[in-house]
Amino acid sequence: MMAIVSESMVSKPIGWNGKTLKQMLKESEEIFAKTGRYYGISTLELKQHDPIRYERLFARIRGGLVNARETALNISASPIVKEIGELSFALYTPEGDSVALSTGIIVHVHTMSDAIKFMIRHDWEINPGIRPGDVFGNNDSFIGDVHNADVHTLIPIFYGPELIGWVGGVVHVIDVGASRPGSMAYGQTTRYEDGLIVSCEKIGENDELYASYELRAKKAVRTPMYWMLDERTRLAGCQMVRDAVLRMIEEEGIDVYKQFIREVIEDGRLSFRQRVKEMLVPGIYEAPSFMDVPFGGEVRMPAHAAKDQLMHAPLKVLVKADGELELDLNGANKWGYHSFNCPPSAMQGALWVQLTQTLIPNDKVNDGAYLASNIRLPKGSWANPDNETLSTTLSWLFLIPSFTGMIRSLGRAYQARGYVEEITAGYPGTWNLTQGGGVNQFGLDSAFTSFEHSCQGTGAGFIKDGEGYCAAMWNPEGDMGDIEAWEQLEPLLYLGRRVKPQTAGMGKYRGGPGYESLRMVWKTRHQVIFNVGEGHVFHGCGIFGGYPGNTGYRHNMHKTNLRKLIDEKRPLPCREGNPEDSEMSKYVDAQYEEFDGRALTLETNFEEYDLYLSVQRGGPGLGDPLERDPKAVEEDLNEEFLLPQYAEKVYGAVIAQDESGNWHVDVAATEKRRAEMRQERARRAVPVAQWMERERERILRQDFIPPVKDMYRSSMELSEEWAKHFRTFWNLPEDFAFGSEQFERSV
């Protein structure tokens, strides 16, 4: 049999100086491993000899990326893109190292790098080939992505016969065609239920998408129009960046361009190291996070997945004297049969989000910072699953909370250096996401994912309160979006959107408050909606005595009398307000309500005139609440950020309300009451050694609910190193293990 050899298989290498891309990548990694510098660069010659030209080159590249993003925003029809800005572009070296990125969803600067390097390592240069005008797509999180709702478009940039770089664009889509509607459906346990997965596939050539790919995508998702417009959004933006790069090369010269893109990455590495040395005190900082997976007894899931679980992120931050930063998740527990697993690319993406909003809050963000840091992700854990058949559609649910410990650790390190103005108490929870699908208001099968949760309160600072309902940490340019835009997509009408009381974490300085949206199901025969939130476990903890922000809850009303209220022009609720005195329940009658602390539930059936409440989170607080300025407490009461009972119980405020409904704080009486509360604290206080011994005895008894014991058992089984650390800290026997009958019987 004669072998068939394609033209691409005998074509010349497309890398620099006659090398293949695989050779270039191998060379780059070997030089860095040997020298500790990107491509062994010891001197930033271009920057030192011609700094103005250096800065001009970077400005042109970054300007091209930002311009592409702003233009692409106007091409898309998806509210997730147009209203929220869930879009970004980045430029890469031939080897797949990021050079610069636009504004937008910063998480993807390295995920797209992983996707490019996957193609190089697996000989895409040979088969299917990489040529000018080719278009590649990816949304496979086990290759290089967060989850399959974040869809990449990757195109090569050629100058003559050489590939001189890549452009990547990413958009969060509305629906991925999974077994459940929306972009981040959950309840799945395997990737076979996760919807359309494109694994670094060549999806077009000659700057056009393949008709076969377009047809497959259209048939696979519930919102084909939005999917295809998002495809064109990314492709158009990538082409704009490519053309801008080629214009710059024509003006500046190819040799200058090649020199610059390598120097700027090494510059990013050096800058990051210097920033770490300037801002942080060397040492080890530890701060764990947890999240519940409350699926116990859920009949719609397989028996092995229908259980309550806890996810464990025992994050250790190691700051070295030379400026190297290491983040260690050693001790994370095992992956689970749920949709919240996070492959390494997703975890590295989350690291980027944290770094770009803390240590390196500037425009020169590239893979230099990645090379200057190290993240340890234990194999077999939820943060590095060794099973690629798992579902990852909602990896965001624990991806960001898992790094909240980093924010608290950096806060302590900033304080040690005296940079108190840099301290923040942390981030709020990442959700409450409204998501669902069914028959929409136009009579069509559809799905929706409302990204109004892109606006949440921030954590308190060391010298000021957090900002309210301003942005989500994964997209600093995020916005809650226009109400009318969401109503065009979704069969839900807004009855109101208001600040949510008691969402801000309390403290000397409070976190920023969140808000709530109250929506009525409208003009649909059938609709399912998920409650997608984080509820039972605090992970956005406060710092230095501050309280966490709110946990979530759900309040939905079914088979209501709203139609009658509307027809009779009677008052309608525009908010929930205080859940203990709900305005929803005050105005509306319903045959049944869902009103509980389960912020994470599988899909629920809704009918026309049913009510759905979405509560967005507030940021954590900082400092002792008894040190808060009484006048600030008064202001929070009148702004409805704070409920009266908590002003009294937590802040120790003595309050009264006048005839106009305004609250007033009696400063003198408040100080007296606070002195009494401090005395009461002292009476209740237990010496640390005594408390530690009490908790140690509890551990020996294994006096925990099953999900806690299962979590710690899994952490200890996956990592003997972490198990030893745990035993040493609590002075436990060397053979102690959770679930051991020996210890359960002996105590």
Image (cartoon, rainbow, N blue to C red):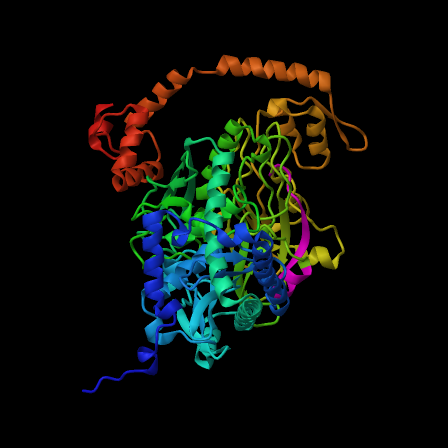
Can residue 452 be seen here? yes
Q: Position of residue 679 (x, y in %)?
A: 56, 12
Q: Position of residue 56 (x, y in %)?
A: 60, 57
Which part of the image, by quadrant, shows the N terminus? bottom left
Q: Is 680 placed above or below 404 here?
A: above
Can residue 366 be seen here? no
Instruction: Indicate yes or no whether the magenta region holds residue 343.
Output: no
Identify the residue at image location x=25%, y=37%.
Answer: 720
Q: Position of residue 613 (x, y in %)?
A: 59, 50
Judged from this view, the residue extending furthest toward the front is 49
Instruction: Indicate yes or no whether the magenta region holds residue 487.
Output: yes
Q: Is 104 placed above or below 538 here?
A: below
Left or right? Give the position of 228 relative to 378: right
Identify the residue at image location x=58%, y=55%.
Answer: 103
Q: Is 80 placed above or below 404 here?
A: below
**Quarter of the view holding residue 357:** top right
Judged from this view, the residue extending furthest toward the left is 1
Stretch of the chain drawn in magenta = 484-503
Q: Nearer the viewer, residue 609 or 528?
A: 528
Q: Position of residue 55 (x, y in %)?
A: 58, 54
Q: Nearer the viewer, residue 288 or 697?
A: 288
**Quarter of the view holding residue 577:** top right
Identify the residue at image location x=57%, y=39%.
Answer: 619
Which part of the image, by quadrant, shows the C terminus? top left
Left or right? Give the position of 564 relative to 267: right
